[in-house]
Amino acid sequence: MAGISTHDYTSVIGRAFGNFIVVRELGRGAMGAVFIGYQKSLKRQVAIKLLPKAIARSESARQQFRDEAETIAVLSHPNIITIFESGEDDEYFYQVMQLVEGQDLARILAKLRRHPVPTRRIMPLHHTMRLVGEVLEGLEFAHEEGVVHQDLKPANILVDNRTGRALIADFGIAKTRQIEFYARGLVVGTPQYLSPEQAAAEDTDRRTDIYSMGVILFELLAGKLPIRDESGKETVVRKIKQPDTFFTQPPAACSPWIDETMEGIILKATAADRSKRFVSARAFGQSLRRWADARLQRDRAAP
Ligand SMILES: Nc1ncnc2c1ncn2[C@@H]1O[C@H](COP(=O)(O)OP(=O)(O)OP(=O)(O)O)[C@@H](O)[C@H]1O
Ligand SMILES: [Mg+2]
């Protein structure tokens, strides 16, 4: 298979997609690559995501990309990356979006883990709570618009350097990939954030994103997830057959910040049976706020 890592993007530098010129590469993902681009008419920098058509080979995956591009264009929210344009040429699907000057959460977490001072290897609690709260607001908005992300993970949450705001990237692209990869029986990337229903290739709904967000919350609070060193394929099988064994330790054993109530929140968000999860991102966010408020009061009351 022409894997993404082997795709040669050198010829796209300087190329125009609509009114946008590709300037330089920002980074690569499992299916595409993101570039800094320039929009001459408005004299502004943008981000351009390119998905080689050689990778989305099946007509259904291609059609899915076109349909999703239309759906996500309506998502206008401060915590969701704005899409300016999308289209295709002979070789690529492209998506032009707001350029975020900052870093994605996966990179921030990786950097934190390497911090020389052990107590600084976890993001400060108020920071975590704010980021998760913002992502949940973006999700709630999208869900109300009928759009499920389906590939929520730290790499798809960008944090703006200047404002500190969290912005969700890659809404809708997951489905294209899913169709293609399921068709070819492939598992790509780390399926840590994948819900059991996705692992089983069942239909998804807003609770799918809630599951992924629960895993991300756990990771942020604990610094890292208590999971096995196993292949992506093994994790997928585990999520289908024994989803309750995904975490090797209970959340409260992994961080002093995770008390019984927070453990309850994490386990509810990541329940294998989706009818046991929070019914909405809003309900999830409310529980988190209640927890944070109670904690603040307790800290104030402490001598
Ligand atoms: N709008 C944007 N502004 C700035 N950087 C971006 C933007 N969108 C993506 N990036 C960066 O580009 C890199 C590649 O993103 P991409 O979405 O291709 O990979 P990914 O999210 O790691 O994997 P996947 O293909 O599974 O989504 C990431 O490091 C991300 O931080
Ligand atoms: Mg991404």
Image: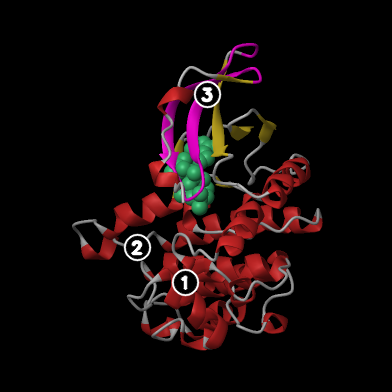
Secondary structure at badge 2 equals loop
Q: Quadrant of residue 288?
A: bottom right
Mark nearer the viewer, 2 or 1: 1
Distance between the Cα atoms at labels 2 and 1? 11 Å
For marks 1 and 3 on the same chain, the one whose residue lies earlier in the sequence: 3
Q: Look at the image and name its color scheme.
A: secondary structure
Q: Is residue 264 above or below residue 297?
A: below
- Tell me if mark 1 has few (under 14), some (14-19) or many (20+) residues whose alpha carbon lies within 10 angstroms of its own: many
For marks 2 and 1 on the same chain, the one whose residue lies earlier in the sequence: 2
- Magenta residues (range): 18-42
Give the residue displayed 55% in from the left and 41% down from the top.
54
Predominant SS along the magenta part? strand
Tag 2 residue: 122
Distance between the Cα atoms at labels 1 and 3? 35 Å
Q: Does the numbered disc 1 mark a residue whose Cβ is under 8 Å from ligand 1? A: no
Tag 3 residue: 37
